[in-house]
Every structure is written in structure tokens, then in C-alpha cells.
Image: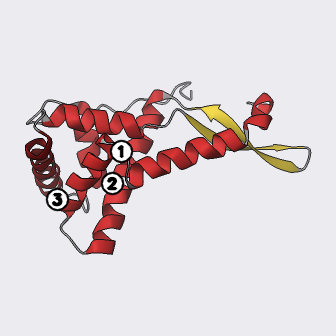
């Protein structure tokens, strides 16, 4: 018989800070299964951010993710031959996943654009997200603006 609910993935906490959120982020930035390299990149970027701001690295990271986490998104809904973009609230786990992906994607884009190291770009993106600016925060604001623009279709929710 089929499962009613999808089984949740269990992610173990990271070794240095004991944070499940940070381990999820390390898994996102990992390429070709090289977790130790991804851990070095993440930990180096967090230590640089910690030196720059003077606060705990984990609290900086959690605040950055919280600032980038969206609360609403638009979903396509087809009604009577027309497709509408309907604003819908996001589940918390999906919102955090989006925020982590956006930070990783903004880091990758900055790295390609500037030619600097991944550690430096990740550190600057985390600090930008912490200060509510930068590429990842811009993606979050775009989601919110799209939802605001389509607020008239909110009565068509699923």
C-alpha cells in the first residue's frame, strides 16, 4: 500500500556547531559527493564572517537564513482555460530549503562574476543576507513582489 505522507529526510547535525540547518546547507553546496571540501568552504566562510562582525558564526548564519526565508510564493493554477499565478503561503521546511538554495546560487553567481574564491563569495553573501541585501535577499523580495502583484487572485487558492 502506498504511503500517505512522504518520509522525511533525517539530516544529522554538523560536527563543529551541531546545527542541522548548517549541515543542510553544506549538503546543498557539496559537489560530486565531496562533503569534506564543502565543510571546509562553509566553516571558513563562517569563521571569516565571525571575525568581521564579532558575533557567533552560527547566529550570523541563522539570522542570514531567516532574513532570506520567504513567507509566500506564487503557484500556477489553471481555471477555465486561463492560468493564474495564485499567491500561497509556504511550508516552513520548503521556505528554509529555498533560502539555502538561494544563498548557494547567489554565491555561485558572484563567484562566476567576480572570479574570487568560493569562501570569500560565500562569506560576503552570508553577510549580505545578514544585512538584508545581496543576491539571495533580492530573490526573496522578487518572490514577495510577485505575490503582492497577484494578490487579486488569492481567492483562487488550492
**Which type of secondary structure does the marked residue at label 3 adopt?**
helix
Q: How far apart are marks 3 and 2 (CA)?
A: 11 Å
Q: Residue at point 10% right, 50% down?
A: 48
Q: Which of 119 and 76 is in front in this view?
A: 119
Q: Are marks 2 and 1 in contact (CB under 8 Å)?
A: yes
- Reply above or below: 35 against 91: below
> Residue 57 appears at what percent x and percent y?
14, 37
- Reply above or below: 20 against 26: above
Q: Is residue 137 left or right of residue 130?
A: right
Q: In this view, does 128 lie to the left or right of 81?
A: left
> Residue 9 appears at what percent x and percent y?
35, 33
Q: Residue at point 36% right, 66% down?
A: 109
Q: Residue at point 36% right, 44% down?
A: 100
**Which type of secondary structure does the marked residue at label 1 adopt?**
helix
**Which type of secondary structure does the marked residue at label 2 adopt?**
helix
Q: How crowded is mark 3: few (under 14 residues within 10 Å), some or many (20 or more)?
A: many
Residue that lies at the very extreme toward the top in this rendered image: 4
Which residue corresponds to mark 1? Answer: 100
Q: Can residue 50 be seen in this view?
A: yes
Q: Nearer the viewer, residue 139 or 85?
A: 139
Q: Residues within 10 Å of mark 2 (few under 14, many from 20)?
A: many
Counting residues from the N terminus, which is met first, the one under dot 3 or under dot 2? 2
Counting residues from the N terminus, which is met first, the one under dot 3 or under dot 1? 1
Residue 104 - label: 2
Q: Residue at point 48% right, 45% down?
A: 140
Marks 3 and 1: which is nearer the front? 3
Which residue corresponds to mark 3? Answer: 119
Q: How far apart are marks 2 and 1 (CA)?
A: 6 Å
Amino acid at each position: 500500500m502506498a504511503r500517505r505522507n512522504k518520509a522525511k529526510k533525517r539530516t544529522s547535525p554538523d560536527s563543529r556547531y551541531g546545527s542541522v540547518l548548517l549541515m543542510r546547507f553544506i549538503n546543498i553546496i557539496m559537489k560530486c559527493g565531496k562533503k569534506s571540501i564543502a565543510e571546509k568552504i562553509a566553516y571558513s566562510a563562517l569563521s571569516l564572517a565571525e571575525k568581521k562582525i564579532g558575533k557567533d558564526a552560527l547566529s550570523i548564519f541563522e539570522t542570514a537564513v531567516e532574513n532570506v526565508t520567504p513567507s509566500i510564493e506564487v503557484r500556477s493554477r489553471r481555471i477555465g482555460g486561463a492560468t493564474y499565478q495564485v499567491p500561497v503561503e509556504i511550508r516552513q521546511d520548503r521556505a528554509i530549503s529555498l533560502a539555502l538554495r538561494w544563498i548557494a546560487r547567489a554565491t555561485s553567481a558572484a563567484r562566476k562574476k567576480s572570479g574570487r574564491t568560493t569562501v570569500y563569495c560565500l562569506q560576503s553573501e552570508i553577510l549580505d543576507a545578514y544585512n538584508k541585501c545581496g543576491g539571495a535577499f533580492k530573490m526573496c523580495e522578487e518572490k514577495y513582489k510577485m505575490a503582492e502583484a497577484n494578490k487579486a487572485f488569492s481567492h483562487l487558492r488550492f
